[in-house]
Image (cartoon, helix red, strand yellow):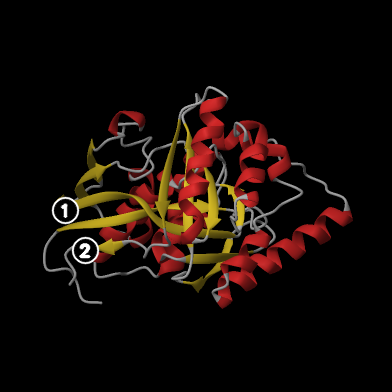
């Protein structure tokens, strides 16, 4: 694509839900529940420097230090990779709640990279951007993972291919997901420090063969249902006998809520990312009673909860493009 006509660009990036139970570190979906906006401006050159300003509903919940923020760390790496020395001003409108398992840090990383890449005439392709964006995930989670950033950049449902070392080989867009509808369930609870890193530490390193086979069946159902536009089949893949049983202690009332949603006609229920949010795959006709039942359960047990109806979203977009 041609070089952007100015040194300023604004990019909007969606929230995401990764894993979807059986797709741990492999499958994710972008949705229209929340959006971050990242504005990148080139104000000088000669050396690399970033002035960061954070606004938005969740501005006070992310580091203001450019050396610790998930939007700026990948941008500095980008400049190093392409051999540019630029003075940048970055404004992050933080509207995706951090620490809820909704791809907040990944969206910040993707927004800054997509904006700067566009300004410079797109010297890097999507795989390079995702590899750099995962540095932001490393900052938050302690290790690289690509599912959230891939969904944020490309939109819809994505599937990640990695080598034995965990490095990115490629990302595949499975579907835009036009026939899929979700209910996000976000409990209002106190979270452990470094929640994502902590939750990854709960995952077993060895599993019985029968569990591997069962999860492989679930993953096959998940991807087949997404690819064919059949949410009722994909929902069968919203199950997991390896990762979720180890991590559900971080998600209050998870098993109760999952059981009740499925009883009320939901297709599938999974922990969104590392939690504590839950993503339910639902039929639009049953979403209202399901939502009511969810609020009833949490209220009964003394929790406050937020629910959001949403659908798969497009990926990161340049707001100036027609």
Assess whether mark 1 and mark 2 are in contact (beta carbons under 8 angstroms): yes
Residue 265 appears in view: yes
The residue that disc 2 covers is 119
Q: Quadrant of residue 30?
A: bottom left
Image x and y of residue 313, in percent? 38, 62
Mark 1: give few (<14), some (14-19) or many (20+) Cα within 10 Å: some
Residue at 44% across / 46% down in the picture? 136
| Of 255 and 219, the residue lying toward us | 255
Q: Earlier in the sequence, mark 2 or mark 1?
A: 1
Q: Secondary structure at mark 2?
A: helix
Image x and y of residue 46, in percent? 19, 51
Residue at 51% across / 25% down in the picture? 303
| Of 262 and 310, the residue lying toward us | 262
Residue at 25% across / 57% down in the picture? 11
The residue that disc 1 covers is 42
Mark 2 and mark 1: Cα distance apart in space: 9 Å
Compared to residue 313, the image places residue 175 above or below, namely below
Residue 27: mark: none
Mark 2: give few (<14), some (14-19) or many (20+) Cα within 10 Å: many
Image x and y of residue 281, in percent? 54, 57
Using residue 270 as the reference point, say whether residue 106 is left or right of it.
Answer: left
The outermost residue toward the right is: 209
Q: Secondary structure at mark 1?
A: strand
How many marks overall?
2
Q: Quadrant of residue 229?
A: bottom right
């Amino acid at each position: 694509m041609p070089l952007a006509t100015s040194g300023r660009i604004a990019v909007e990036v969606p929230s995401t839900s990764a894993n979807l139970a059986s797709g741990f570190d492999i499958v994710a979906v972008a949705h229209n529940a929340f959006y971050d906006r990242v504005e990148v401006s080139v104000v000088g050159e000669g050396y690399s420097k970033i002035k960061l300003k954070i606004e938005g509903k969740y501005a006070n919940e992310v580091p203001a230090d450019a050396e610790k923020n998930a939007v700026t760390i990948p941008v500095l790496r980008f400049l190093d990779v392409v051999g540019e020395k630029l003075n940048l001003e970055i404004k992050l409108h933080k509207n995706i709640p951090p620490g809820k398992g909704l791809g907040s840090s990944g969206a910040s990383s993707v927004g800054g990279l997509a904006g700067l890449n566009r300004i410079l005439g797109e010297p890097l392709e999507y795989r390079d951007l995702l590899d750099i964006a995962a540095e932001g995930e490393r900052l938050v989670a302690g290790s690289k993972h690509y599912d959230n950033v891939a969904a944020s950049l490309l939109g819809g449902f994505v599937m990640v291919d990695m080598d034995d070392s965990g490095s990115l080989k490629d990302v595949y867009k499975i579907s835009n997901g036009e026939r899929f509808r979700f209910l996000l369930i976000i409990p209002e609870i106190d979270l452990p420090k470094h929640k994502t890193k902590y939750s990854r530490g709960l995952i077993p390193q060895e599993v019985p063969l029968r569990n591997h086979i069962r999860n492989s069946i679930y993953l096959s159902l998940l991807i087949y249902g997404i690819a064919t536009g059949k949410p009722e089949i994909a929902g069968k893949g919203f199950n997991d006998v390896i990762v979720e049983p180890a991590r559900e202690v971080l998600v209050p009332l998870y098993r109760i809520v999952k059981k009740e949603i499925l009883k009320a006609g939901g297709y599938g229920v999974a922990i969104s990312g590392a939690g504590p949010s839950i993503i339910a795959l639902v039929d639009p006709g049953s979403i209202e009673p399901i939502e009511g039942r969810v609020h009833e359960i949490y209220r009964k047990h003394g929790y406050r909860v937020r629910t959001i109806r949403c659908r798969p979203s497009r990926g990161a977009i340049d707001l100036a493009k027609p």
